[in-house]
Image: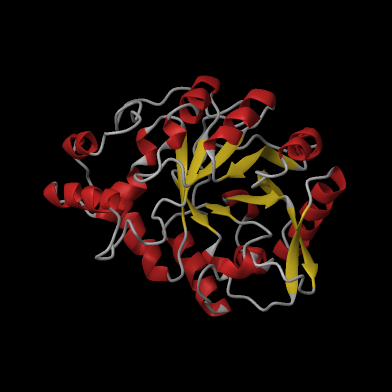
Amino acid sequence: MTPLPALPRVGLGGGPLGNYLQPISDAQAQAVIDTAWAAGIRYFDTAPFYGLGLAERRLGRALRSRPRSAYLLSTKVGRLVKPGSNGSREASIFAVPDDHHVEWDFTRDGVLRSVSDSLDRLGLDRIDILLIHDPDRHWPQALDEAYPALADLRAQGVVRAIGVGMNQSRMLVDFVKHADPDVLLAANQCTLLRRSAFEELLPLCQERAIPVVAASLLHRGQLTTPPPDAPADVQRIAAACRDHDVPLTAAALQFPLQHPAVHSILMGAHEPAQITTNLAALDHPIPDALWQALSPGPALGTPAGSARTGDGGSRLRAAASPPPP
């Protein structure tokens, strides 16, 4: 299998395709993916957990007619989708029927089963990036069983890159120190509101040339259109953006990319217009004065526009992203 090219600057997050927080139709999900493709997005992230398999099925259907060499696909392991309800509320954030549930499984057999199930749902021939998903309460098993299974799949050429995706920085740091990840997905930790990744994780990844994908940047809409009772931190950020005539969404999406360890961000969308709006925000000019106004807290690292360091990871070579066909 050929080496993975450099991560694109932006990818489509698959949570909304699994009816995250609100239902969307199959046709609407297709339209979101089609719009992302037409706009040049060639990196798509999903997981079995998103809609209990629904996001993988929808994404697979939409991508099946696209040239497989033209895009990157990531999915995850750690939760197996099983038939029937088990009374768990974990998946209640997805508006899907209560006829399936997920079971945590970071064993080698669980990883292999998860990959097989994902390929069946996607209807595709391969996965580019495979991530261990949310092993917060399963750290020993994730490191001792799941990670070696992923490393074997990488060595066999079944997947091109491996890593972990989490909502916390401390365990991601431990994972970097005890394993050999090609990429990390950091959610809710290198955002305008939550900056824990800037303290140790991003400097460590920069040092070791491990590219980071940042996700969950808009905090469920708080950093798009803040409600009147928004927290003080949100109000301060919004006021600074107004003072510099910059849309709040633009600052929120571009903020993690100011650090050289962050190579890509994920944007989710429930409707096609959100893709167009967010891509425009991602390209909106932002003056250095705004970044300085937003700087309280951990430092950003290399300023915007400065050269990045590292080659994108041990197996992520610095090459152009696949061009549109």
Foreground pick, 315 / 213: 213
Q: Is residue 248 visible?
A: yes
Quarter of the figure with the N terminus:
top right
> Where 101 sits versus 148, above or below?
below
> Where 143 sits versus 246, above or below?
above
- What residue do we see at 69% from left, 39% from top? 160
Dividing the picture into quadrants, the one containing residue 50 is bottom right
Percent position of residue 65, x then y: 63, 65
- What residue do we see at 49% from left, 37% from top? 320
Percent position of residue 302, x then y: 34, 26
Image position of 18 (left or right of 307)? right
- What residue do we see at 40% from left, 43% from top? 194
How has the structure been colored for display?
secondary structure
State the residue lying farthest toward the left. 243
Total numbered circles: 0
Percent position of residue 126, x then y: 73, 51
State the residue lying farthest toward the top. 207
Dividing the picture into quadrants, the one containing residue 285 is top left
Q: Is residue 6 visible?
A: no
Percent position of residue 182, x then y: 62, 32
> Where 275 sits versus 142, above or below?
below
- What residue do we see at 34% from left, 42% from top? 255
